[in-house]
Image (tube, helix red, strand yellow):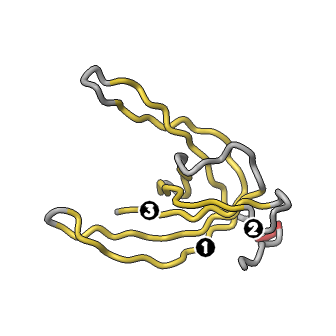
């Protein structure tokens, strides 16, 4: 089980962003990011790895971001932290009491 942080440990400011899709006229869509709420968070580095991406290696960092519970947060969204875009790969309410929301995130470089 994930240890929930104390409120005093939530020292980082993060912004939750939602994708906005605009048709590109060729059957696809352009994606822009709409900045939503900026909240206090506890951000923990959880490791990383490298994988082949075409002709090069792509580094991937894994982070865990814990925020106060917010309804409406989905895995389609991303988190902006210190200029880094973190895609949400999973989210959960660790104790089922709607106090905290734990976001498992990845940053690809």
Q: Secondary structure at mark 2?
A: loop
Q: Is residue 1 left or right of residue 96?
A: left
Tell me if residue 67 comes above or below residue 31 in the rendering: below
Mark nearer the N terminus (3 vs 2): 2
Image position of 28 (left or right of 39)? left
Instruction: Please name the residue that numbered disc 3 is placed on.
Output: 107
Q: Check if mark 3's residue and mark 2's residue have beta carbons within 8 Å.
A: no
| Label 3 secondary element | strand
Farthest top residue in view: 25
Which one is closest to the eye, mark 1 or mark 2?
2
Q: Residue at x 63, y 54 (%)?
A: 14
* Residue carrying label 2: 94
* Residue sticking out furthest to the left: 55
Mark 1 highlights which residue? 44
Disc 1 crowd rating (10 Å Cα; few below 14, some 14-19, many 20+) is: few
Tell me what residue is drawn at x 72 percent, y 79 percent: 1
Determine whether the residue tagged by mark 1 lies in a helix, strand or loop.
strand
What residue sits 36% from the left and 23% below the top?
23
Residue 64 in the image: above or below residue 2: above
Q: Nearer the viewer, residue 80 or 58?
A: 58
């Amino acid at each position: 089980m994930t240890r929930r942080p104390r409120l005093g440990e939530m020292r980082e400011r993060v912004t939750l962003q939602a994708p906005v899709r605009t048709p590109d006229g060729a059957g696809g869509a352009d994606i822009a990011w709409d900045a939503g709420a900026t909240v206090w968070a506890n951000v923990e580095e959880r490791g990383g790895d490298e994988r082949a991406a075409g002709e090069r290696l792509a580094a991937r960092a894994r982070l865990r971001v814990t925020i106060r519970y917010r309804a409406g947060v989905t895995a389609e969204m991303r988190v902006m932290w210190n200029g880094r875009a973190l895609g949400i790969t999973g989210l959960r309410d660790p104790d089922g009491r709607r106090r905290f929301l734990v976001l498992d995130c990845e940053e690809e470089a």
